[in-house]
Image (cartoon, rainbow, N blue to C red):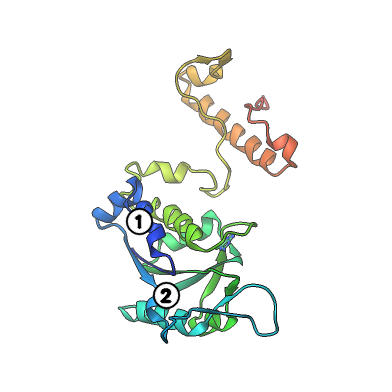
Amino acid sequence: MRIDIVTLFPEMFASFLDGSLLGAARRAGTIDVRLTDIRDFAEGVHRQVDDRPFGGGPGMLLMPGPVVSCVEAVRSAGSPEARTMLLTPGGRPLDQPLVEELAGLERLVLVCGRYEGFDARIAQTLAAEEVSIGDYVLSGGEVAAMVIVDAVARLLPGVLGHEESAAQDSFSGADRLVEGPQYTRPREFRGLPVPEILLSGDHGRIATWRHDQAVAATVRRNQPSPIHSSSQPQRSPS
Ligand code: 6GU
């Protein structure tokens, strides 16, 4: 899969792209991530990429010229129709079903916003979708692009190393449950024992218990916060 990232701050991605999960996937040729600097498509001596909003208001907007030229140049290398996403807090919320869909693409273009946002004609001209990673505001789309690349890359064949892992993740599978509590050694930590059933060797009962825990954790997560904060295993209905 090829992912192009269009940004004013390509240097922000260096350690992320070389890091363990992505660095290995890139060296293996599973994923090809390329960075393109919007500034390279700006015109004039000042290489201006942003300007004040018509009608007034705070901040600066990304101008359509440099962003559209940049994305068009990136897409013209083979796939003028490549799915293109503008990263902006008002966009469609990213979730695991969307991540799974993106992991099935040959190419994806992620456009990072800065300043107060994009001129509205950028999305129109590029037939781009707008995507957000959550209900809070970041100072730019770069961190959001890293979130998307990370979530997508770990679903590509060979990236995790053990293919079952992704299928077992929270939000995966038909029921979209979050994972319940898990335990490793020691069997007792500061007076807290590992639930007896996990030591029983009874794989059928363990699977049932885990499913019950996942249902309870999923319900709890959708409750107001004081209840959500408890991460103790819930008693299984017997
Ligand atoms: Cl994609 N961009 C920015 N600037 N803020 C965000 C976001 C994106 N998603 C959530 N907050």
Residue identified by numbered label 2:
38
150 is higher (above) or lower (below) than 61: above
Counting from the top left corner in percent of width and height, residue 129 is at 54, 73
- Residue 84 to residue 159: above or below: below
Figure check: 121 above or below 11: below
Residue 81 in view of the camera: no
Give the x, y percent position of residue 20. Answer: 33, 45
Q: Residue at x 45, y 45 (%)?
A: 167
Looking at the rendered image, the quarter that the N terminus falls into is: bottom left
| Amino acid type of the residue that numbered disc 1 sits on in the rendered structure | Ala
**Where's residue 216, x and y in %?**
65, 35
Which residue is more in the foreground, 27 or 238? Answer: 27
Ligand 1 lies in quarter = bottom right
The residue carrying pointer 1 sits among few (fewer than 14), some (14 to 19) or many (20 or more) residues within 10 Å by Cα, namely few
Q: Could you say which quadrant of the image residue 3 lies in? A: bottom left
Identify the residue at the far front of this view.
45
Q: Distance between the residues labelled 1 and 2?
A: 17 Å
Residue at the farthest left position: 28
x then y, percent, for residue 193 = 56, 15
Label located before the other in sequence (1 or 2) = 1
Viewer can see residue 136: yes
**Ligand 1 near label 2 (Cβ, under 8 Å)?**
no
Q: Name the residue under label 1.
A: 14
Name the image quarter holding residue 40. Answer: bottom left
Examine the image and state in which quarter residue 57 appears: bottom right
Residue at 62%, 27% in the rendered image: 233
